[in-house]
Image (tube, coloured by chain):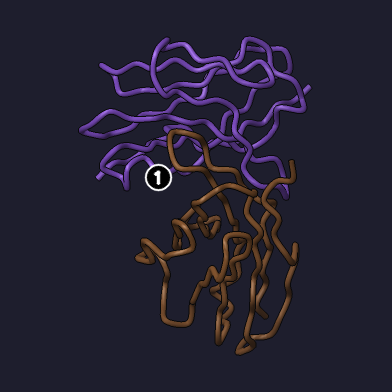
């Protein structure tokens, strides 16, 4: 069975500093990878996705992520964060064995706390 | 396009009452998912449908939980009888067949007193 590990439950950072949110996954087959963001009292919103092709994926709000197959990682980065980036971030994986890419396995989330 | 629509946004009820959560998926999406989110357990998949047919309900916690999808534009998640430990945020999501992402509603925050 596949799994997703988000190594940090909370990441505090100052405004305008760079940030990296870590995600590792386990799967024996090819995967699709996603990052979602959840603002307070809202649902999950897609930030970016990796399906195939270039391993560097750019998403909304200035975020990007790099797929590293050998390290089974899909870390999320932003070069300069804003107060408004304070939210919970979820990494998710889907594979062919998982109902034909239909369902997602989510990590437990990382709370990004941006302070002035 | 309208996103996934869930109702109600908030529900507070007493233990033992029946609770019905509603979801309207995005038009044209043939998969629908029900999730539960709690601090302790994170985001859990309860059940999902494909073309209105339940495919996997192994995440449904107990027989008190049931879900239906009578047509392509409507689904319900019912809890009867409700218990305080059912308090959580319940999300509905939908997607098209293929590699596209799931789209989430804003959730229903359920409190069982």
Q: Write down the chain letter for disc 1.
A: A
Residue at 56%, 49% in the rendered image: B94
- Residue A20 in the image: x percent, y percent? 53, 19
- Residue A79 in the image: x percent, y percent? 62, 10
Q: Is residue A115 above or below residue B16?
A: above
Residue closer to the observer: A20 or A48: A48
Q: As drawn, which residue projects farthest toward the bottom?
A: B16
Residue at 42%, 10% in the rendered image: A54
Side (left or right) of B111 relative to B71: right
- Residue A52 in the image: x percent, y percent? 39, 19
Count of numbered tags: 1
Colour of chain B as rendered = brown
Colour of chain A as rendered = purple
Q: Is residue A111 above or below residue A99?
A: above
Side (left or right) of B20 relative to B39: right
- Tag 1's secondary structure? loop
Quadrant assignment for the C terminus of chain A:
top right
- Residue A60 in the image: x percent, y percent? 65, 21
Residue closer to the observer: B90 or B101: B101
Q: Is residue A107 above or below residue B40?
A: above
Residue under pointer 1: A102
Q: As drawn, which residue projects farthest toward the left?
A: A28
Residue at 45%, 62% in the rendered image: B46
Q: Residues within 10 Å of mark 1 (few under 14, many from 20)?
A: many
């Amino acid at each position: 069975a596949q799994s997703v590990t988000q190594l940090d439950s909370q990441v505090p950072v100052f405004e305008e500093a760079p940030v990296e949110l870590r995600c590792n996954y386990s799967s024996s087959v090819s995967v699709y990878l996603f990052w979602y963001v959840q603002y307070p009292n809202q649902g999950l919103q897609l930030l970016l996705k990796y399906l195939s092709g270039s391993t560097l994926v750019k998403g909304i709000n200035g975020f990007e992520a790099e797929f590293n197959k050998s390290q089974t990682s899909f870390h999320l980065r932003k070069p300069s964060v804003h107060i408004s980036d304070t939210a919970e971030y979820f990494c998710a994986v889907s594979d062919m064995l998982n109902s034909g890419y239909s369902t997602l396995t989510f990590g437990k989330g990382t709370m990004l706390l941006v302070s002035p | 396009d309208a996103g996934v629509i869930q109702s109600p946004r908030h529900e507070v009820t007493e233990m033992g009452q029946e609770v019905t959560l509603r979801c309207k998926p995005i038009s044209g999406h043939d998969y629908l998912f029900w999730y539960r989110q709690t601090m302790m357990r994170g985001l859990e998949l309860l059940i999902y449908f494909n073309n209105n047919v339940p495919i996997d309900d192994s995440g449904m916690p107990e027989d008190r939980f049931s879900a239906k999808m009578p047509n392509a534009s409507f689904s319900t998640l019912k809890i009867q009888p409700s218990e305080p430990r059912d308090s959580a945020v319940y999300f509905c999501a939908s997607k098209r067949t293929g590699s596209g992402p799931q789209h989430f509603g804003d959730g229903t925050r359920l409190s069982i007193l």
